[in-house]
Image: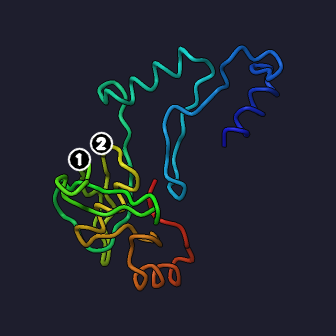
Amino acid sequence: LSNMVLNYLYSKGEYNPSSNVGFIPAPCHRLDRNTSGLIVFAKNLESLQLMEELFKEKKSLKKEYITLVAGKLFDKGKIDAPLFKNEETKTVKVLPESKGGKKALTYYEPIETFKECSLIRVNIITGRTHQIRVHFSYINHPVLGDSKYGSFNINKRFEKVFDYKNQFLH
């Protein structure tokens, strides 16, 4: 993605790698590989620092996710469960802070409930790796299409019916 942005800026004459003075346009935040959405890039260091601060303070800039989860959720809720990332297996699990877990807080609100699933709006306060996917799996409402933390049987059924193989997280 970074290379695509750099090539685009180069083609517009807004970035020249040979006259680079120490800063290369860069993303201001991250997004898990299988999650769709927007990525904000900064063209200069001042913009990058400003955007990173705005993302960090969570006041004037809001990141919001939409996801489809298994089962029915009718009410707004909060998931407050610490997460631990295993660097060797590249997986994350809920683990008490006393055992190495890090604070992780997720708020959600149902948008629409269907026969077997719920479309929900999600706001994460902490932004840990795989936070949404692990938290919803933890409360037995895994993100549909999630091959790492989701339900293999439910995913197969949805893939067969809707011919969609990716996780439903945007």
> What residue do we see at 48% from left, 36% from top?
29
Residue 43's disc number: none
Residue at the image position 51 percent from the left and 47 percent from the top: 37
Relative side of 5 to 122, left or right: right
Which circle marks residue 103 in the picture?
1
Rendered position, 132 above or below 142: above
Left or right of residue 14: residue 45: left
Q: Looking at the picture, which amino acid does disc 2 mark?
A: Thr
Q: Earlier in the sequence, mark 2 or mark 1?
A: 1
Q: Residue at x 53, y 59 (%)?
A: 34
Q: Amino acid at mark 1?
A: Lys
Horizontal and vertical percent for residue 85?
A: 37, 57
Q: Quadrant of the N terminus?
A: top right
The residue sitting at 63% across, 22% down in the picture is 43
| Position of residue 53 measured from the top left corner of the image (x, y, whole percent) | 39, 23
Mark 2 = which residue? Answer: 126
Whole-percent x, y for residue 57 in the image: 31, 26
